């Protein structure tokens, strides 16, 4: 009989404290260490790229310029427009940090996406919430901003109360919530998928040796797929942030 | 029919106190996630299908269409992900 006991979810994403054990606020576990590591990697990457900047880029500088170009052309110019270029540093940092944090999901020996815990995506979504409201109030004034974001143009009068209510809810609550949950649930789902196939491979290998080949092949393919998901989710989180900022900056007419 | 019910009753009577609840929770999770995946599945199909049509008609606009497609996927997919999260929350 195949002995397949899938570990409970809490064993897969909750880690024991490593430093400051038992401290309710500042205990440090694997996820927090990975968070620090992601910050260090992003910081180190861009510092190395910028330290010996040359006109004809080579090596690290080349990669960094590709990243900057990507955020500039595919995220900001698409999501906000030319007057959003002041947000390049913020959105580039956001994109790189999320991407590196997600990439920990597939790095052997680490294999824990930082964003599979709700705290980090929620925190980033709250930052973006504050930023786009600030931008909207600054660019349009509080009352005009509220009107522009809750009353879409061209809605029949009878439908207006309902539409305005939904839009108001959307702009105050649903946007940051869905932004955070999207990233969190995608990374959690990916992590669970990889764990499922790893557990299956191990159990089948123990029982039949040869039967493990199929789940192992799928596990390797899914690991490649998760790299794509890590990139895509970082991209989607950043471009949605850009779209929200752009929406606050330029009201619909 | 009666036999099925009688057998079910017998099986239920043999079980420990938490077993039934565990089984029902598992079924509930399946229904929650399965139900939440229907709409977004259709929606993402529509989004991507129409994006491919647009890209095939105007290959020079492919970049713009692709960005908008990912945005559309992200919005549609959010509902399925709520279901995914909810499936874990259902009955602890």
Image (spheres, helix red, strand yellow):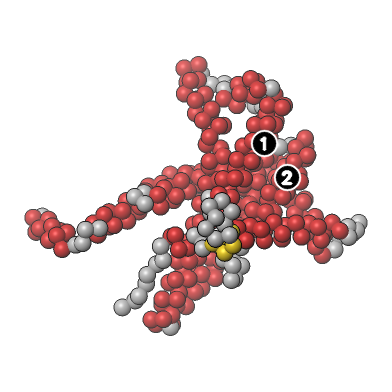
Residue A9 coordinates in the image, percent (x, y): 43, 60
Residue at horizontal 91 percent and vertical 56 percent from the top: A55
Residue at horizontal 81 percent and vertical 57 percent from the top: A47
How many circles with numbers are drawn on the protein?
2
Image quadrant in which the N terminus of chain B is located:
bottom left
Q: Which residue is mark 2?
A: A90
Residue A179: give its label. none
The chain ID associated with circle 1 is A
Query: Outermost residue toward the top?
Result: A157
| Residue contact between numbered discs 2 and 1, judged by CB atoms under 8 Å | yes
Bin the neighbour count of mark 1 within 10 Å (Cα to Cα): few under 14, some 14-19, many 20 and up: some
Does residue A115 sit above or below A127 in this rendering?
A: below
Q: Secondary structure at mark 2?
A: helix
On screen, residue A251 versus residue B10, left or right, reads right
Bin the neighbour count of mark 2 within 10 Å (Cα to Cα): few under 14, some 14-19, many 20 and up: few
Seen from the viewer's position, the closer of residues A190 and A9 is: A9
Residue A163 coordinates in the image, percent (x, y): 50, 25
On screen, residue A54 versus residue B60, left or right, reads right
Residue at horizontal 21 percent and vertical 62 percent from the top: B16
Q: Secondary structure at mark 1?
A: helix
Q: How far apart are the alpha carbons under marks 2 and 1?
A: 11 Å
Seen from the viewer's position, the closer of residues B80 and A178 is: A178
Seen from the viewer's position, the closer of residues A81 and A169 is: A169
Residue A131: give its label. 1
Visible residue check, residue A65: yes
Residue B81 coordinates in the image, percent (x, y): 48, 48
């Amino acid at each position: 009989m195949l002995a397949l006991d899938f570990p409970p979810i809490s064993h897969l994403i909750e880690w024991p404290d490593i430093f400051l054990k038992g401290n309710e606020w500042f205990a440090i576990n694997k996820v927090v260490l990975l968070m620090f590591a992601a910050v260090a990697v992003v910081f180190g990457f861009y510092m190395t790229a910028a330290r010996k900047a040359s006109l004809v880029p080579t090596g690290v500088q080349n990669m960094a310029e590709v990243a900057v170009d990507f955020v500039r052309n595919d995220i900001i110019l698409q999501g906000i427009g030319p007057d959003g270029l002041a947000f390049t540093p913020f959105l580039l940092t956001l994109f790189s940090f999320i991407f590196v944090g997600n990439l920990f999901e597939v790095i052997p020996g680490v294999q824990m996406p930082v964003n599979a815990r709700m705290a980090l995506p929620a925190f980033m979504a709250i930052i973006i919430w504050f930023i786009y409201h600030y931008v909207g109030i600054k660019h349009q004034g509080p009352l005009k901003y509220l009107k522009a974001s809750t009353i879409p143009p061209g809605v029949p009068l009878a439908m207006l109360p309902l539409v305005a209510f939904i839009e108001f809810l959307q702009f105050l609550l649903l946007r940051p919530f869905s932004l955070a949950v999207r990233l969190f649930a995608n990374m959690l789902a990916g992590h669970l998928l990889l764990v499922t196939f790893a557990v299956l491979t191990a159990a089948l290998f123990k029982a039949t040796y040869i039967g493990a080949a199929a789940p192992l092949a799928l596990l390797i393919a899914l690991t490649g797929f998760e790299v794509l998901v890590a990139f895509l989710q970082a991209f989607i989180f950043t471009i949605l942030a850009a779209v929200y900022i752009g929406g606050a900056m330029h009201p619909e007419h | 029919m009666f036999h099925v019910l009688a057998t079910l009753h017998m099986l239920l009577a043999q079980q420990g106190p938490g077993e039934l609840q565990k089984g029902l929770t598992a079924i509930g999770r399946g229904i929650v996630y399965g139900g939440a995946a229907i709409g977004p599945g259709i929606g993402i199909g529509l989004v991507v299908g129409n994006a491919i049509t647009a890209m095939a008609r105007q290959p020079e606009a492919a970049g713009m269409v692709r960005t908008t497609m990912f945005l559309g996927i992200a919005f549609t997919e959010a509902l399925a992900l709520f279901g995914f999260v909810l499936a874990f929350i259902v009955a602890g």
